[in-house]
Image (tube, rainbow, N blue to C red):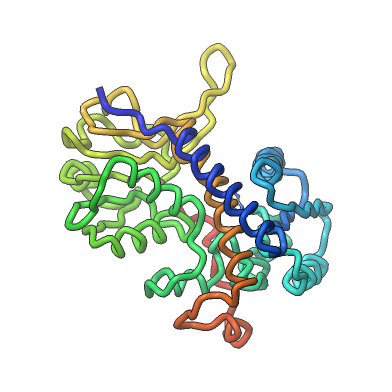
Amino acid sequence: MADIIDGRAVARELDEQTAKAVQAMVDAGMTRPGLAVVLVGNDPASEVYVGRKIKGCEKTGIRSFEHRLSKNTTQDALLTLIARLNADPEVHGILVQVPLPDHIDTGVVLGAIHPDKDVDGFHPVNVGRLSTGTGGIVPCTPLGVTKLLDTVIDDMTGLDVVVIGKSNIVGKPIAMLLLEREATVTVTHIETKNLSDLCRKADVIIAAAGAPELVKGYWVKPGAVIIDVGITRRKTEDGKVKLVGDVAFDEVQHARAVTPVPGGVGPMTIACLLANTVQAAREAQEGGKAHAFASSEWDLLPDRSMIFDKNDD
Ligand code: GUN
């Protein structure tokens, strides 16, 4: 049987560290870390995620500032709010929940968040910092994936990793993070030829394609480590809803370790968001790190509208 990587337990530990870090900042006379969460409209899944983020703030002592806007909010009104939050010294992190309504350009909105408050790590400046290994805020799900890998692999040097999925917010940043760890990373997607053959050679498979049970047992080499980022709601025959990952979990028990769905990567995403908020608050108050690409240059970028591929996998 494969070992189960318990994302809930790892997230709990990270939350404890975050809570201690918050308290240490307050004890040192610093401003309590603050996270602004912006939700436009009332997409039910987004409501659930935002609720969890606010609850996570309460649990760790982070101040939360909730902004719930109607689905008819204009892009200009949203940009005005972001400008206000960018200038607010009590707000160290800004999260605009996506998807946004169709009349709003997601790339423009996310590009308007100051990179030093971009706790999602979606801003082109932070993407650039990650790609060049020059610090910055790392997207939450990829960061969570590396923390889960750390629980089972001491050293990634030279390991063959196959990432399935090339999204800007999961697949690509995971590849960057693991390249920094000297792994040999192959980024694939659902159109990749011979995907099963590539996977069968991998020491680590990271499945983030949003394709339920794509990775079959015969795709997995004995002893491999599997991280399943996928999460799809599937109706069962008795009308209930079951969450299904990108990996056929029951077929991969010859792996060394695997994350379950739910209870694997999911809980790590919020824990990493909270940790990122504390990092941003600390850097804002300690004068920040020296970045190769300074944030003061961010508003000189010619084009801030690049972030999201709407259909990326
Ligand atoms: N919608 C689903 N996941 C996320 C996330 O990690 N960040 C934001 N901003 N929106 C999301």
Residue 212: percent from the left, percent from the top?
Answer: 42, 34
Percent coordinates x, y for residue 101 in the rendering: 72, 55
Q: Seen from this angle, which residue lies furthest top?
A: 238
The residue sitting at 42% across, 32% down in the picture is 6
The one of 64 and 163 positioned closer to us in this rendering:
64
Of the pair 72 and 249, the residue shown nearer to us = 249
Question: Is residue 266 visible from the viewing direction of this image?
Answer: no
User: Looking at the rendering, in which quadrant would you find the N terminus?
Assistant: top left
Residue 11 location (% of width, % of height)? 50, 40
Q: Residue at x 69, y 51 (%)?
A: 62
Up/down of 35 relative to 60, above or below: below
Q: Is residue 303 above or below residue 16?
A: below
Visible residue check, residue 178: yes
Percent x, y of residue 68: 81, 51
Q: Is residue 270 left or right of residue 33?
A: left
Quadrant of res 308? bottom right
As drawn, 67 above or below 179:
above
The residue lying toward the viewer, choosing from 310 and 291, is 291
Q: How many marks?
A: 0
